[in-house]
Amino acid sequence: MTRPLHPSLPHAKYMIVDLFAGPGGLDIAATIMDDVESIGVEWDDATCETRRAAGLLTTTVKNVAALGPCDDEVVEANVLTGGPPCQSFSVAGNRKGHQALEQVKALATRLAAHDDAAKFEAAWQKVKDETDDMSDDRTGFVLQPLRWIMEAKLKRGKPYEVIVLEQVPTVLPVWKHYAKLLRGVGYAADAHVLHSEDFGVPQTRRRAVLIAQWDPENVGRRVEFPRATHQRYSKGATRLPERHASKGDQEELLFPLPRKERTPLKPWVAMHDVLTERPRDFEVVSNYGSGGDPKNRGRRTSDRPAATITGKVRRNRVFRLKETRSGIKEIGEELERLTFEEAGLLQSFPRRYPWRSTDVAQQIGNAIPPLLSLHILSSALRLGPPSEDLINKLAMWEPKHSDGAANEVLTEDA
């Protein structure tokens, strides 16, 4: 099947435009949902090859800054999502990272202070000039979703009904500030940090998430975030028995259910639950040091979720664990390092996801876990928690139109 030269969103109740879309961590979750469609904006050619192989819609214009909500390919979208690059803020504990956060918050305030399209355009041009002059031009990327939001309201005349933004936890102060600004222009909005393993992702990855819903008559109302379905991992914790949780397990969560609505949490999903072709007992040794000591490598045994999957995942080493006569498990021989398929599974991508081109590890590491996206979208669109059937549908997804190499990717040096 050939894709049209200018793909556009098919008609659905919820039509998403996903900025900085990556290989499809959010889009693939959207496409399995009923009456939801998605089109992504992605600049990286290698990543776009993966999206094409997965059958995901991608705009012909690759640059988020060169598009806007009035353009033909995305004009029908009523939901905006995005995860702008975060490198400028990833070291927010130091002076430069903190300064970048404060700059973006100040510039965002200037952009949201207008209710006239012409005045907003003039403000945007001044802000753009300032961000173009910054030493790290990626700092301005985090303002692009706000530009799209304001242009949809002021230029298109049709505000986005729902907005979902996500990034690393250090960006939470920006999302909290955005939520305040969005309440001032007609949205109920809030932002929190979510833990991926709370939702069945076999990986401990935290994301700062903003959810906003157009509701100009009730901007102060509470915005519901997804509620945990699985046990949260912590170092030294014991994995819960299947379908069992104590009172404390619920009460320690960010969004505990009311007591009358509580159901037992499921145990966290462990690496050996999804990497089923490996020996059941193994240990992953991280490429990174911890505690300031490069020799102190992080370690996770296979009965636990993986540490955060990054673009350096192929550098992690994997060892078999063997049980001694005394019952202690010791490291045995070194096994093959994690494959791209396995790294994708730890991110909750379907097993048959068609990774393509070069730098696949970076594509996987930069993505938002699709299972986490499914829970976030279900909550943001007020559809209720995703059903087990929908979760299974995501896990069993396969590309509809194979190009003859469903699992073939270019390998990279470990």
Image (tube, grey):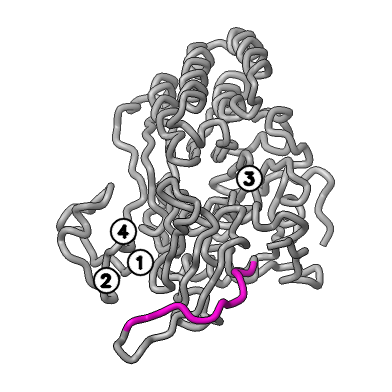
Q: Secondary structure at mark 2?
A: loop
Residues shaded magenta: 328-339
Indicate whether 145 appears above or below 38: above
Spatial separation of the CA atoms under disc 4 and disc 1: 10 Å
Which numbered marker is on residue 234?
4
Residue 58, percent from left and from top? 72, 47
Residue 130, percent from left and from top? 63, 13
Q: Which residue has dot 2 on it?
A: 240
Q: Quadrant of residue 388?
A: bottom left
**Hey, what amino acid is under mark 4?**
Ser
User: Neighbour class for label 4 at 10 Å: few (<14), some, many (≥20)?
Assistant: few
User: Neighbour class for label 1 at 10 Å: few (<14), some, many (≥20)?
Assistant: many
Q: Is residue 292 visible?
A: yes
Q: Secondary structure at mark 1?
A: loop
Q: Which residue has dot 3 on it?
A: 21
Spatial separation of the CA atoms under disc 3 and disc 2: 35 Å
Q: Which residue has dot 1 on it?
A: 268
Residue 400, percent from left and from top? 70, 68
Residue positioned most to the bottom = 325
Of labels 4 and 1, the one closer to you? 4
Residues marked 1 and 2 touching at CB (< 8 Å): yes
